Image (cartoon, rainbow, N blue to C red):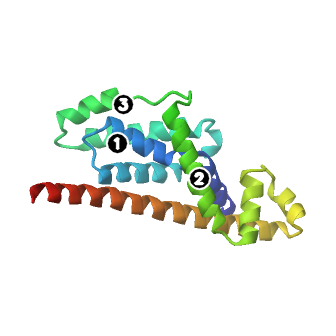
Amino acid sequence: MPNDDQDRRLWIAAHILPYEGEVRGWLRRYAHSLSNADVADLVQDAYARLCVIDFTTISNGRGYFYTIVRNLLLEHVRRARIVPMERLGEIEALRIPSEEPGPERHVTARQELERLERVIGTLPEQCQRAFRLQKFAGLSQREIAAEMNISEKTVEKHLASALLRVLRSLTIDERDSAVQRGGAGENVGRFRQD
């Protein structure tokens, strides 16, 4: 079972995590009635759903992530006693973006990749090397073990450690960014009142 959990975490890191910033931006852009906390809650709920589904049948992680978030938003509206009219219109207009990469998606992807590279650069040397060999070179654990001249079990430990550190760091970065965005808005509002 732990291997299944590790496979799931690796799949989420490879097929979902790279699109988190894009999905958050999509919600902020098209669902203006959502607060930053609402967006964070939706994304968190989407990850909770991803922890229980059969990810092996999903061929398009990006599209699936968008669909989960949109469906969660619809569920929240159905359960709510009072729903702002604005939100109903936003949900109706909230369409899953095309797979064709636009300029904004290229910029977002490049920024996410740069962020991931910074995080990977902070990993211990062996973890970093194993992670790069698996994620960027596409090597299996057995091939990584042969390349690094270590056991497969050690490779597994390096990959698990790397993944946890990457996820933790990216989560902290996202939380810090949300605090900065929220804090900047409060300061602007206070400045205008003075």
Q: Are marks 2 and 3 in contact (CB under 8 Å)?
A: no
First in residue order: circle 1 vs circle 2: 1
Q: Quadrant of residue 2?
A: bottom right
First in residue order: circle 1 vs circle 3: 1
Q: CA distance from mark 1 to mark 3?
A: 11 Å
Q: Are marks 1 and 3 in contact (CB under 8 Å)?
A: no
Asked if 95 appears above or below 48 in the picture, the reply is above
Amino acid marked by disc 2: Glu
Kindly identify the residue that appears in the image at 28 percent across and 44 percent down: 34
Residue to which mark 1 is pinned: 28
Q: Nearer the viewer, mark 1 or mark 2?
A: 2
Q: Which mark is residue 114?
A: 2
- Image side of residue 143 versus residue 123, left or right: right
Circle 1: element type: helix
Kindly identify the residue that appears in the image at 34 percent across and 60 percent down: 180
Q: Quadrant of residue 131?
A: bottom right
Q: Is residue 159 visible?
A: yes
- Image side of residue 56 versus residue 185, left or right: right
Q: Residue 94 or 194: which is nearer the viewer?
A: 194
Q: Position of residue 53 (x, y in %)?
A: 55, 47
Q: Position of residue 170 (x, y in %)?
A: 52, 60
Q: Which mark is residue 94?
A: 3
Circle 2: element type: helix
Q: Position of residue 97 (x, y in %)?
A: 47, 30
Q: Residues within 10 Å of mark 2 (few under 14, many from 20)?
A: few
Q: Residues within 10 Å of mark 3 (few under 14, many from 20)?
A: some
